[in-house]
Every structure is written in structure tokens, then in C-alpha cells.
Amino acid sequence: MKLVSVNVGASRPIAGAGKSGFTGIFKEPQSGLVSVGRLGLSGDAIVDTENHGGPDQAVYVFSTEDYAWWSDRVGRELAPGTFGENLTVSGFRSAEISVGDRFVIGEVVLEVTGPRIPCGTVSARMKDRLFVKKFRAAERPGVYCRVIRKGRVRAGEGVGFEPYFGELDPPLGVIEDFREFFEPHNTEATLRRQLAAPIAVRDRVYKERLLLELRSRQASSQ
């Protein structure tokens, strides 16, 4: 695996998406070393902090393999950073990744917390009002990561991969989690499985609440 591009974006206006009218989705490749901290890449703007960013969505990673698929579908080459990812990496596909897997780039260690869920900003960026539906159907969302170990990265570096090793067997696949977002089952077994994975705290709080509500309904029906 290889780090093909390191992408950072400033806040800029966008039409047709977001409450503020601004976005950080327009990422530009960086030529030198870029610092990666607990909240992401140095100089990278996170505008919609209610739904994006934070320690568990600090770094967004997308693959060249998934980009090749998308380029074929839209009929033009999509450059690194088009989908707003911070790191463009070769050698993997979204469907192959599980929550808890780790990417190692030099001194930096990233842990996958879940898939990217498409929003209206993606459609506005692609100038296609149906793109959210297309993104969902494609099931090639890329992955959000938390930063386990800080450091600096540069395009061209090798990327190590460490599969999830924990109590959950089999691990929670990114695509499994992606599908569950759009068509939630919210059974006790499903919620327990998700909570057993190292998902984002934002998702964990929500799913713990759902589990409590489910138990409460079950208790009241007995």
C-alpha cells in the first residue's frame, strides 16, 4: 500500500449544501510533510462540526482503487481529494476494511472507526443532485479514522496495514456498518455487535441509547 496524496482544504463557499453555506470538502494535494494530530491534518478545515470531524473522524481515507471505479462510472478521471478525503491510499477497497483495522504511515497510526456517510455537500461538490443515492448504491465510501499516534506524513510513503484484532469475531465490516446506517435493524444482537467494535463515540452514544430503549420496550411488554 502507498500514500498517493495528502489533501488539505480551506473553508470556502458552496452552493446547495450545508447550513453555513461553507465547506471544507475542496481538498488540495500537499507536496511536503503534513502534521497529523488528534483532530486531523494541520491546516484542514472542518466546517460542519456537528456531523464531521472530532477525534473519531479526524482523518478521512479513500483508495485509488475506489477512485478508478468511480472515474469509470462518471466518465472522467477524478483527482485525489475530489471526495474530500485527507489521505488517498493505493492497495485497498472500502469493502475489504473493518472497523478497528489500522493504517500505519511512518510514525502515524490511524484506526478505522466507520464509513463515510454521504450528505448533500457531496452532491453539491459533484454537481449532481442524485449523487448521494449513487454514493450509497456504490458501497465504496472510504473510511474515517481516529489518530492513535500522531506524527507527520508525506505523499509517496509506504502504508502498513494491521487488521483488527479484538473480541469481535468476525469484525464489523465497514460496508456492513454502512448498510446498517441506511437500513437499520436495531435488534439487540445487531446493536451489541456494533457496540463491541471500536466505533466512533458519537455513534456509540446513539446506539447505547437505542439499546436501552429496546430493553425498556421489551421489559414493559412482559
Image (cartoon, helix red, strand yellow):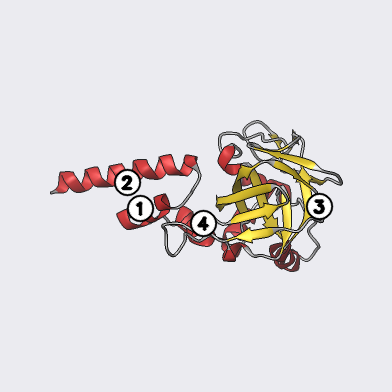
Kindly state the secondary structure of the residue where label 1 is placed. Answer: helix
Picture quadrant where residue 161 is located: bottom right
Question: How many discs appear?
Answer: 4
80 horizontally vs 171: left or right? right
For the residues labelled 3 and 4, the Cα–Cα distance comes to: 28 Å
Kind of residue sitting beneath label 2: Leu
Work out whether mark 2 precedes mark 3 in sequence or the reverse, and give the earlier one: 3
Please say if 91 is above or below 34: below
N-terminal of the pair, mark 2 or mark 1, is: 1
Asked whether residue 130 is in view, the answer is no
SS under mark 4: helix
Which three-letter amino acid code belongs to the residue tagged 1? Answer: Arg
Question: Which residue does the image show at 56% across and 34% down from the upper left?
Answer: 50
**Viewer-closest of 102 and 15:** 102
Label pair 3/4, CB-CB below 8 angstroms: no
Residue 74 drawn above or below residue 19: below
**Which mark's residue is nearer the viewer, 3 or 4?**
3
Q: Earlier in the sequence, mark 3 or mark 4?
A: 3
Q: Which residue is mark 4?
A: 178
Residue picked out by circle 1: 192
Q: Badges 2 and 1: C-beta atoms under 8 Å apart? A: yes
Q: Tell me the distance, in whole angstroms, between the alpha carbons under discs 4 and 2.
A: 19 Å
Q: CA distance from mark 2 to mark 1?
A: 8 Å
- Residue 208: horizontal and vertical position, in percent? 36, 43
> How many angstroms separate mark 2 from mark 3 (CA)?
42 Å
Residue at the spot of label 2: 211
Q: Is residue 3 above or below residue 206?
A: below
In this rendering, position of residue 113 left or right of residue 78? left
Label 3 sits on what residue type? Ala
Q: Which residue is mark 3?
A: 155
Q: Identify which residue, 189 or 73, lies in the foreground.
A: 189
